Image (cartoon, helix red, strand yellow):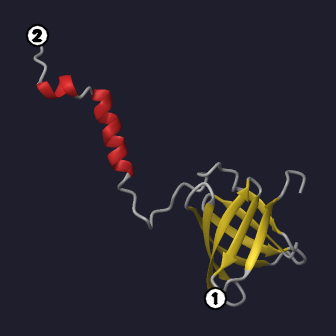
Amino acid sequence: MRKQKTRFNRTFPIGAMLVIGAVALSGCQTKDEKIDPIAGGGGLTGKWISSDNVFSAQLDNGNFFSTANDTGEVLSQGTYVVISAKEIQMKWRGNLSQQENSANCQREGVGVLVCTDLAGKGFTLRKATAAS
């Protein structure tokens, strides 16, 4: 028995329909949805040190915590979201102050994040090398 092709199948091959469906689904992501933390070139996971060497931040899969470099005390805990290849948003709660804060960070290079918090205070994080 011979299968009858419909006009739809002749004009839209299955592969094309799958591509169109994938594109349509990708547009359904909401703004509040966490974007893959390894997007934008990856390399965020690991230890980052503040440029003034006061604190370090350990980033891993959308979560992070910061510690004082002199005492090792945990200063804050929070989350980060990769917005684009160049932009990362961080949100955290200070362990001592119990205050919420956030920062927008621009990725100036693979190992450099330049950030500005809600109060307008800037800070820079540099990726620690494997030997650190």
What residue appears at the point 70 percent right and 51 percent down from the top-left corner?
43
Residue 130, compared with residue 76, is above or below; it is above
How far from the left and from the top, in percent, is residue 125? 77, 66
Q: Find residue 13 and report its image quarter.
A: top left
Local packing at callout 2 (Cα closer than 10 Å; few below 14, some 14-19, many 20+) is few
Circle number at residue 1: none
Three-letter code, disc 2: Arg
Most extreme residue toward the bottom, as rendered? 97
Q: Is residue 18 left or right of residue 35?
A: left
Q: Earlier in the sequence, mark 1 or mark 2?
A: 2
**Where does the image place residue 121, in percent across and percent down from the top left?**
72, 82
Q: Is residue 59 above or below residue 41?
A: below
Say which element carries label 2. loop
The quarter holding residue 70 reads: bottom right
Label ID, residue 2: 2
Residue labelled with disc 1: 99
Query: What crowding class fits label 1: few (fewer than 14 Cα within 10 Å), some (14-19), or many (20 or more)?
Result: few
What amino acid type should be assigned to the residue bearing mark 1? Gln
Q: Secondary structure at mark 1?
A: loop
Question: Would residue 5 appear left or right of 127 to someone viewing this image?
Answer: left
Find residue 93 and report its horizontal and vertical position in percent: 64, 81
Where is residue 77, by image quadrant? bottom right
Residue plotted at (73% across, 64% down): 113
Q: Residue at x 35, y 36 (%)?
A: 19
